Amino acid sequence: MRLLKENKVLFLNFSSLSVLQISNYLFPLITFPYLVRVLGPEKYGLVNFAAAFVTYFSMLTDYGFNISGTQIISLVRDNQRKLKKNFWTIFFVKAILFTLSIFIFLPLVFFIGKFSSESLFYFVSFLMVFGTVLFPQWFFQGMEKMHYITLVNIGVKSLWVVSVFIFIRHPDDALKLVLLNSVSFILIGLLGFTLVIVNFGIGFYLPKISEIKEQFIKGWYVFLSTVSISLYTNSNIFILGLFTNNEVVGYFAGADKIRIAIQGIFGNAGQSIFPHVSRLFKESLEKATGFLRQYLKIIIISGGVVTVASFLFANELTLLLLGQKYVASISILEILIFLPLLIALSNIYGIQIMLNTGHKKEFTKIVFSAGVLNTVLALVLVPYLQAIGSAIAVLTAEIFVTTAMWRFVKRKRIL
């Protein structure tokens, strides 16, 4: 009881994100098996390839603020003036980057055959970027008010689930699915943005050019790290789509969706504790490391059990969730299944420790090196091994990241 009282806000945030994560499992559990069967590997692969393409623009507009913005807001949340200034400055940075994204996106879609042949598909997918620009997840996380994220997401995604079963009936409805996805992103963004303005009393503030420049500088290393991370996460589907076909992308995407669902078990915990750990490091190194040692034990034990169980039942998981058309996804999942535990560990050593102790440059170097490693391996392996090559590339990159971050933290004797 004492522990619960001392960490009431942390437990509330963790509970909120746990509920959100359960909903994130529940909704795909309802729709995912349906969609992969109705669309088939080819159309399902096209949907995921388009999503991987526009993710680059979401990443550009995010500029790493889900990490750096969270940290900034958590440190100024008791100062309304600074809170307002930082909220609007970050939003203006994202708006500038969204405008830049449009100017990059249009020539690519109009003049490159891979995209121009399905231009409407990519235009509709790009609308998701606008939704991510609007949604201030970084603000809610920094304020440790994650229940807002939960309520908004569950409400909109419930409507999305119903819409999927009403409107998606055969492979030719793939474009309708992309439209539903984009509309849900925009709705979540609009609701989240409105909640910040109304519930937190954030009046309008026009940031100075110097303040916008300062946010660009503050977020630079985190942005580089997110770009680098994308080189060994999002880029695998993208590279696979360039060298193979939509059907092969569908096999990989199906297996990867199962991996992502399993990874979510640990992902919400990492998001919940980040602002809390940031403040602990500010107060005392001993308090922060003591908290993280206990958290590390929980992750190793629970992650080990989940990984082993998932590997042993990869065949059953794949056939149950994807169906007989996706037998080729089984061997892919058996490789990808080790990622959730590795990513949870690298989150502790990298996000929670290295970023909170001022080692942003070293963090960026590690993930950038991993991104290059993954890209090179994917370019070499995918033409010969296709989806298996992509899975091997991303697993190798994540092993490198986790090992390098662990060695850095040990060498600095932080944990």
Image (cartoon, rainbow, N blue to C red):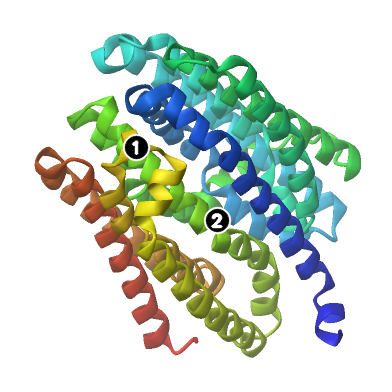
- Callout 2: 10 Å neighbours few (<14), some, many (20+)? some
Q: Tell me residue 46's x, y (percent).
A: 36, 24
Residue toward you, 286 or 375? 375
Quadrant housing the N terminus: bottom right
Residue located beneath label 1 in the image: 324
Residue located beneath label 2 in the image: 264
Tell me the CA gap for discs 1 and 2. 25 Å
Q: Looking at the rendering, which quadrant does residue 141 occupy? A: bottom right
Compared to 121, does 414 lie above or below? below
At mark 1, the secondary structure is: helix
Compared to 343, does 137 lie above or below? above
The residue that appears at 40% across and 31% down in the rendered structure is 48
Q: Amino acid at mark 2?
A: Gly
- Evaluate whether residue 339 shows in this view: yes
The residue that appears at 23% across and 53% down in the rendered structure is 393
Q: Tell me residue 108's x, y (percent).
A: 33, 18
Q: Amino acid at mark 1?
A: Gln
Q: Are marks 1 and 2 in contact (CB under 8 Å)?
A: no
- Evaluate whether residue 214 shows in this view: no
Specify which label sits upstream in the sequence, 1 or 2: 2
The residue that appears at 26% across and 17% down in the rendered structure is 114
